[in-house]
Image (tube, rainbow, N blue to C red):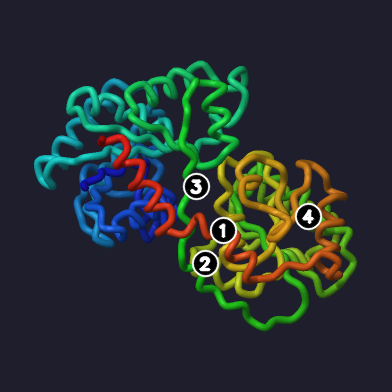
């Protein structure tokens, strides 16, 4: 079987997380014996430095076609981009042979590729991840609704990465989606926990309002133990405001805004973490939670959608969004041992996100749409 994955980017040394969800999944199905082409349609704005035009190379046994054009707001030129995507796909078929499945990720890319099945007859499978669609229809812009409907118009199957997103797709667009979660990097399963002093809390995410790091810092401020620390990995527009809050609460010696970090650094910090906490307003999946659990670290998560599908009493604690006191109590309960977790059980609780498991589900779906 030959499958072309279409994504909005491909990880690189300069941008290691750009297209990481899609590419990690592509590697998983390639490892399962599928011949994979990977088309990255990189339409980021001019300010993002990279090579323009088409680059072709092989990596991890995958044929990669990286097309970069700084269009910025792609939706204004959707018809042009649809024709461009079709030409690029035809080039892949000419060079790599007939493709059996076209698998797109995110409704923006799926809409750009919507012309391809009409012109070639290939079966289109679309995976939805976007938080923009994980809300009531009245809160989604008319333009995003139009693009989403275009994205799903010619699909043989739609995948949602979580139960909550599948329900939104059903309610908003009458789409019956198959639920298949993201692949979690298997390197997180290899993390060995290092001996360390104190009790370390870790959080990872973009420093934006929706991640509610201010709630986490305020909850942490009620923890009086001097040997309990909080490290927040990530960068974003809320960095100055969060640092000001840390200064205001007198937490400089115990709370660290680490900044951006690569996967290797995150894994190192996870090896020294006793608890992971992230208080997002909304998540369609929540890969940071799944990575922490794969590493054997218990989590504190909010009732925000995606994590509710895999955070359970055996691997973590769930609290309501905005419940700062509830977060503080949850942290205390782990520190004082009133709630205990077993590392092995935590790791096994997210085995459904292992590459081989996700690849098997995808291949079964591919076969079903080809019958």
Viewer-nearest of labels 2 and 1?
Answer: 1
Q: Are marks 1 and 3 in contact (CB under 8 Å)?
A: no
Dot 2: element: helix
Which mark is nearer the camera, 2 or 4? 2
**Which disc number belongs to residue 217?**
4
Which residue is drawn at the image coordinates 54% and 31% (left, top)?
132
Which residue is label 1 attached to?
350
Which image quarter: residue 322?
Answer: top right
Comes first in the chain, label 3 or label 4 = 3
Q: CA distance from mark 2 to mark 1?
A: 12 Å
Disc 2 target residue = 188
C-alpha distance separating marks 3 and 4: 29 Å
Answer yes or no: is residue 168 visible.
yes
Q: Which mark is residue 181?
A: 3
Q: Quadrant of the C terminus?
A: top left
Residue 263 rendering spot, x and y as whole percentages: 49, 64
Q: Nearer the viewer, mark 3 or mark 4?
A: 3
| Labels 2, 3: front one | 3
Task: Please provide percent x and percent y for residue 167.
Answer: 57, 30
- Would you call the spot at circle 3 few (<14 residues within 10 Å), some (14-19), or many (20 or more)? many
């Amino acid at each position: 079987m030959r499958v072309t994955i279409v994504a909005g980017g491909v990880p690189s040394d300069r941008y290691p997380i750009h297209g990481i969800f899609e590419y990690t999944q592509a590697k998983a199905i390639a490892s399962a014996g599928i011949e994979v082409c990977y088309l990255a349609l990189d339409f980021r704005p001019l300010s993002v430095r990279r090579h323009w035009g088409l680059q072709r190379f092989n990596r991890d046994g995958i044929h990669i076609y990286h097309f970069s054009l700084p269009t910025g707001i792609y939706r204004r030129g959707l018809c042009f981009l649809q024709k461009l995507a079709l030409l690029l796909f035809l080039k892949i078929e000419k060079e790599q042979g007939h493709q059996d499945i076209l698998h797109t990720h995110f409704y923006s890319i799926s809409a750009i590729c919507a012309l391809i099945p009409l012109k070639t007859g290939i079966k289109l499978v679309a995976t939805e991840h976007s938080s923009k669609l994980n809300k009531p229809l009245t809160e989604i812009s008319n333009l995003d609704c139009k693009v989403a409907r275009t994205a799903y118009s010619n699909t043989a199957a739609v995948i949602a990465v979580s139960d909550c997103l599948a329900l939104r797709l059903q309610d908003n667009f009458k789409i019956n989606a198959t639920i298949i979660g993201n692949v979690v990097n298997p390197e997180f399963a290899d993390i060995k926990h290092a001996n360390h002093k104190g009790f370390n809390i870790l959080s990872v995410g973009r420093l934006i309002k929706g991640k509610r790091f201010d709630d986490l810092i305020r909850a942490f401020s009620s923890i009086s133990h001097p040997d309990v620390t909080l490290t927040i990995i990530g960068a974003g527009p809320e960095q100055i405001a969060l640092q000001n809050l840390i200064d205001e609460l007198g937490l400089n010696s115990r709370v660290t805004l680490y900044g951006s970090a690569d996967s290797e650094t995150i894994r190192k910090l996870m090896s020294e973490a006793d608890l992971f906490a992230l208080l997002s307003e909304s998540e369609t999946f929540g890969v940071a939670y799944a990575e922490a659990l794969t590493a054997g670290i218990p989590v504190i998560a909010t009732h925000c959608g995606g994590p509710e599908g895999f955070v359970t009493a055996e691997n973590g604690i769930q609290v309501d969004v905005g419940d700062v006191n509830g977060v503080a109590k949850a942290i205390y309960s782990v520190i004082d041992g009133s709630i205990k977790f077993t590392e092995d059980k935590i790791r096994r609780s997210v085995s459904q996100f292992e590459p081989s498991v996700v690849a098997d589900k995808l291949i079964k779906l591919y076969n079903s749409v080809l019958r």
